[in-house]
């Protein structure tokens, strides 16, 4: 749903949101109706977080390579 | 002009001059530089700098192996540091001149208290000023986020340490991506401090593009290590808007920039390892969160299923219970109806009997009354009967079958019949 929006989150924002959702999912008050929504969002956030850690941001790399004194 | 001397003769004269007691066994204060140990002998430069930091005096020196082991142990025991470059020292020297190898100051004693005092004095002064300015802990209070990946590096480009840092960082086993940008600065020599400060200024202009700064020395001589103990550099690092990792000092040397930075590591490799560990910890955290998501979903679904199963079991039981309750109620009603009817019929019977009794009583009364009335009437009839009147002496006269009640109705010659109590007589009217 908010793919464009979710990619704009920083790693810290995304992982904090993820932890909040997991807390909600673990809460006894979490209804089965919200579960699929929470699961979908948390999987999206997990994907984004992992990508931020392990996939190269080519645009950022290019900018920093140009800036470097190397 | 005197006969010219051979070089060896001239050098021999110099050598003899140095036998003078004024240059033998003298205590001298100086700064060490380019110290190296080879085959147990310690070779170093004794230097003196002016207030501007420029070297104004220099003398090559040696501590022969036979003395060095003992001197170095004594020095280390007192100062906590091995004898190294960039230290202020007080040494007892005797200068010799060798015809072949030239001038050499031979060190045969050292006063470690002097070194300790000088190092500490300088450091204490700088630390006191940083503390008084209220900036000493500023960099330590900064947050570098959960996974610093965008790293501004201050180092010398060709330095081995920088290469080690990049290799360790970019070749990490977890596949973590890092973005490094080098801001070059000399890391030894007189230009080190202004060079690092200038590099930091350039980074600050692009502050938003980085998560942290790493300042690493490229290895090599430790002769200028003490130059890092500089107030301006420490103040720049302490107040820098991004957290800084320093790998300036050596194992035993912690410079003041190391003290004020967010994190101090011993080597460039250690700086890279730290950053990799931050990222790896986040990968672990993500894996743990992924497990939590799956477990939470599974648990919630299992819980919902259990709930459904419970309702599933409970519903037939409820229905059965309801049916049984209804049946029991019906049974009660069924049993109650005949009793109610019986009671009702009994009540009605009593009521009817009462009416019958009333009717019977009423009928008996009425019969009695009628019987009495008839009796009375019979008495009256008896009293009023003609026979009774006749019995009392009266008679009844009839003419042609009709009762004569008036004398006018009778004429002469009429045949009258008179009835008496015990028979009739006929008579003819004469007049």
Image: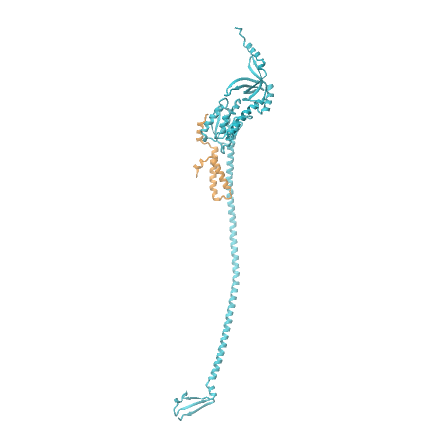
Chain colours: A orange, B cyan
Where is B123 relative to A10, above or below? above
- Pick the residue in front: B33 or B427: B33
- Pick the residue in front: B427 or B338: B427
Q: Kindly indicate the quadrant of the structure image that contains residue B39.
A: top right
Instruction: Look at the image and tell me in which quarter the C terminus of chain B lies.
Output: bottom left
Where is B408 relative to B142, above or below? below
Where is B307 relative to B183, above or below? below
Residue B124 image offset from top left, x and y in percent:
54, 26
Left or right of A13: which side holds B64?
Answer: right
Residue B216 image offset from top left, x and y in percent:
50, 26
Residue B425 image offset from top left, x and y in percent:
44, 91
| Residue extending furthest toward the bottom | B430
All told, the count of numbered labels is 0
Residue depicted at x 46% and y 29%: B204
Residue A49 image offset from top left, x and y in percent:
48, 35
Q: Is residue B156 visible?
A: no
Q: Is residue B117 visible?
A: yes
């Amino acid at each position: 749903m908010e793919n464009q929006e979710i990619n704009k989150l920083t790693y810290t924002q995304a992982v904090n949101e993820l932890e909040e959702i997991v807390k909600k999912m673990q809460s006894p008050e979490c209804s089965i109706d919200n579960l699929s929504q929470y699961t979908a969002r948390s999987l999206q956030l997990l994907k984004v977080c992992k990508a931020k850690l392990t996939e190269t941001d080519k645009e950022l790399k290019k900018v920093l390579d140009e800036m470097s004194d190397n | 002009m005197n006969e010219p001397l051979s070089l060896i003769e001239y050098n021999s004269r110099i050598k003899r001059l140095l036998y003078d007691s004024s240059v033998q066994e003298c205590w001298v204060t100086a700064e060490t530089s380019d110290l190296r140990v080879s085959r147990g002998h310690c070779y170093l430069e004794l230097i003196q700098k002016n207030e501007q930091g420029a070297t104004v005096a220099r003398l090559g020196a040696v501590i022969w192996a036979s003395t060095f082991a003992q001197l170095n142990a004594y020095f280390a025991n007192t100062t906590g540091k091995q004898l190294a470059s960039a230290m202020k020292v007080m040494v007892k020297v005797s200068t010799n001149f060798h015809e072949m190898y030239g001038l050499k100051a031979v060190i045969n004693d050292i006063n470690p208290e002097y070194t300790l005092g000088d190092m500490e004095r300088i450091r204490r002064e700088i630390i006191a000023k940083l503390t008084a300015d209220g900036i000493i802990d500023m960099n330590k209070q900064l947050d570098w986020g959960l996974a610093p990946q965008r790293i501004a590096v201050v180092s010398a480009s060709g330095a081995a340490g920088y290469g080690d840092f990049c290799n360790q960082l970019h070749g990490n086993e977890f596949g973590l991506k890092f973005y490094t940008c080098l801001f070059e600065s000399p890391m030894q020599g007189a230009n080190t401090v202004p060079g690092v400060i200038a590099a930091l200024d350039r980074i600050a202009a692009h502050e938003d593009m980085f998560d942290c700064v790493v300042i690493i020395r490229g290895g090599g001589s430790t002769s200028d290590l003490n130059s890092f103990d500089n107030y301006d550099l420490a103040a720049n690092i302490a107040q820098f808007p991004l957290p800084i990792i320093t790998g300036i000092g050596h194992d035993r040397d912690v410079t003041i920039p190391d003290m004020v930075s967010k994190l101090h590591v011993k080597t460039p490799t250690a700086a890279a390892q730290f950053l990799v560990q931050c990222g790896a910890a986040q990968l672990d955290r993500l894996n743990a969160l992924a497990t939590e998501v799956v477990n939470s979903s599974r648990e919630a679904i299992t819980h919902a299923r259990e709930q459904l199963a419970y309702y599933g079991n409970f519903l037939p039981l409820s229905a059965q219970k309801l049916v049984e309750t209804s049946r029991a109620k019906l049974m009660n009603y069924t049993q109650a109806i005949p009793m109610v009817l019986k009671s009702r019929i009994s009540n009605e019977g009593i009521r009817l009997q009462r009416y019958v009794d009333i009717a019977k009583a009423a009928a008996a009364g009425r019969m009695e009354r009628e019987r009495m009335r008839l009796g009375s009437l019979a008495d009256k009839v008896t009293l009023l009967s003609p026979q009774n009147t006749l019995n009392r002496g009266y008679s009844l006269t009839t003419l042609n079958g009709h009762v004569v009640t008036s004398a006018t109705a009778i004429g002469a010659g009429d045949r009258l019949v008179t009835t008496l109590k015990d028979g009739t007589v006929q008579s003819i009217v004469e007049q």
